[in-house]
Structure formats: C-alpha cells, structure tokens
Image (spheres, rainbow, N blue to C red):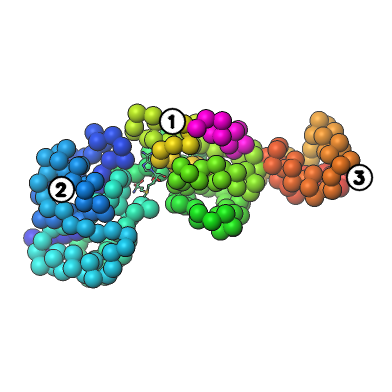
C-alpha cells in the first residue's frame, strides 16, 4: 500500500478527548511531525506511543516540507499533529498539505477536537451559517478595519483571541458592532476552569473587565451575525435621552454614543435625531 500523510487532531485540554483512531495512527506511523517536540512528547508518553517525533512548525521553510513529503513518497507513513486541536486550524500545516496534494500524495484526516467547533456547538448562536475568522490582527488599526469589514456579515462570527488582548478586542467589537450584539465567550474548553457565557457585547465587556480570571487562559469569542434591524426609530425614553445629550453634544457624537449604548444602528439613531431637531 502507498504511504500516506495523516492529519491527526489531538485534545485541546482534556486528554480523554483523543480518539482511538488517533492513538492507533500515532502508534503505527513511522514518524510524527509536530510543532513543539517537548510538548508533544508529553502527549505521546501519556498514551505510551513510542513513535519518533520530527519538528515541523510555522517557521519551517519549504525544504522541511519537501523532506517530509519525500519520505512519504519513499514509503514512510507520517502523521502531522499540532500543539493542540486540529492541525491547520490557526496552526501550521497548510503549506505541507497543499504541497502533498499537488504531489498526489494521499492525505488522510483523523478528525477530533477543535476549539471553535466545540465553542460553536454550545454557544446557542446560529450554527447553520458561520465563519471562522481565526485570530484578529494584534494592531488596533488593522483589527478595527477587519471588524468593520465583518460588521454586516449575517453569519455567526468566530474568533480566537489571546488573553492579553481580550479587553482591547471586546472594546473594539462594542465600537464596531454596537453594545447590543449577542456574544459568547468560551474559555478553557474541556479544562478545569471551563466557562461559557452569553451576553450582549457591552455586558460581556463589563463582566470580563470586572473579573481578572476571565482574562486568563485560552478563549474563543463568538458573535451573532448582523440582523436587519426591526427598530425603525427611537422609543419615547430613548428620545428623551437623545434630547438631553443634544443639549451638550453634536448630533453625530450623540448618535455614536446612543448607537453603542442601545445596540441600535447609527444610521437609525442619526435619522431619529435629525427628526427631533
Ligand atoms: N488548532 C487549534 C484548534 O483546533 O482549535 C487552535 C490552535 S490556536 C494556535 C490556539 C487558540 O485556539 C487559542 O489561543 C484559543 O483561542 C483557541 N483554543 C485552543 N484551545 C482552547 C480551549 N481549550 N478553550 C478555548 N479556546 C481554545
């Protein structure tokens, strides 16, 4: 039989989430390519897998991919794993698989854990249409630009985020999507401090800001997609508030504040304000 490249998912926290087929594959291939040999060795030790590890990471150049694929072409079965979850999902492997496919090498998936799939499955947000956006840019300007591009996307939006950027990221999301957009934070999935919370964005920001524990660990943010607003204008209370603010601030600033606070699109608030004056 021709040798193959196996793309093997590993757990995202709880080691019991590994599949029987993943263990069997990792035991029987000739080599396992991984991001961090020390970390993956711990996983192999836990499951008493004696297969030799080779390094393949984000910064590996094409000669490493070429060497691995030449080994497969010469009859060696190789498995690719990442530090956690499914390889290629915000993890290395794309160039390797792309090259393998173009060299007509059989690539076999051994599916399993993936943080965003686990998060989506428990979020209570629509799962019939979604887009996985991976990590947002770390620089504020680029992050805001990316969010602006997604503002009117109707599908559920899924992001990975690093703990030290969670507050900045949620603040930008409130600015762009409005504080009323439904959001879910899924943190430390399958681990001891697993937390899944669903709030409107501004409440989620307030909750995460007020509890340092919520700013730790691994996290997925999910946002409900854009819904065509049913609100056509402001109610009496909201109009009163708008009038008060208009005494002190220009209409554009008032509509920005109210839109973010009430979760009503800026265009509608602005039109209502113009009608008031
Ligand atoms: N390949 C992985 C997968 O299949 O999900 C993702 C790897 S990516 C480098 C790491 C990011 O995935 C983390 O920063 C976090 O956003 C998310 N993640 C990984 N494990 C997680 C967990 N147990 N709970 C929540 N998010 C997790």
Q: Is residue 245 left or right of residue 156?
A: right
In percent of width and height, residue 234 lies at 79, 37
Cα–Cα span, label 1 and label 2: 31 Å
- Label 3 element class: loop
Identify residue for label 2. 26
Q: Which residues are magenta?
A: 200-212
Q: Nearer the viewer, residue 114 or 48?
A: 48
In percent of width and height, residue 101 lies at 26, 66
Of mark 3 and mark 1, the one earlier in the sequence is 1
In percent of width and height, residue 90 lies at 38, 53
Prevailing secondary structure class for the magenta stretch in the rendered image: helix
- Binning the other alpha carbons within 10 Å of mark 1 as few (below 14), some (14 to 19) or many (20 upward) gives some
Identify residue for label 1. 195
Identify residue for label 3. 277
169 versus 208 height, above or below: below
Q: Identify the residue at image location x=51%, y=43%.
A: 166
């Amino acid at each position: 039989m021709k040798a193959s490249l196996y793309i093997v998912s590993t757990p995202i926290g709880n080691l019991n989430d590994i599949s029987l087929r993943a263990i069997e594959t990792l035991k029987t291939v000739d080599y396992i390519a991984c991001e961090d040999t020390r970390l993956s060795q711990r996983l192999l030790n836990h499951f008493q897998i004696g297969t030799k590890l080779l390094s393949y990471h984000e910064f590996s150049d094409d000669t490493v991919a070429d060497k691995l694929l030449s080994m497969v072409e010469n009859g060696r079965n190789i498995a690719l794993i990442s530090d956690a979850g499914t390889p290629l999902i915000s993890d290395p492997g794309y160039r390797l698989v792309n090259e393998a496919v173009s060299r007509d090498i059989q690539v076999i998936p051994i599916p399993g854990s993936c943080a965003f799939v686990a998060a989506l499955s428990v979020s209570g947000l629509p799962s019939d249409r979604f887009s996985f956006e991976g990590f947002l840019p770390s620089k504020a300007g680029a992050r805001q630009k990316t969010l602006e591009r997604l503002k009117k996307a109707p599908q559920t939006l899924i992001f990975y985020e690093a703990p030290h950027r969670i507050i900045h990221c949620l603040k930008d999301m409130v600015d762009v999507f409005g504080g009323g957009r439904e959001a879910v934070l899924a943190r430390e999935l399958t681990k001891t401090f697993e937390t899944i919370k669903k709030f409107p964005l501004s409440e989620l920001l307030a909750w995460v800001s007020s509890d340092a524990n919520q700013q730790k660990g691994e996290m997925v943010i999910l946002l409900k997609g854009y819904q065509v607003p049913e609100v056509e204008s402001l109610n009496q209370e909201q109009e009163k508030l708008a009038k008060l603010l208009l005494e002190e601030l220009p209409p554009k600033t008032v509509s920005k504040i109210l839109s973010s606070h009430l979760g009503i699109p800026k265009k509608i608030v602005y039109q209502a304000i113009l009608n008031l004056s």
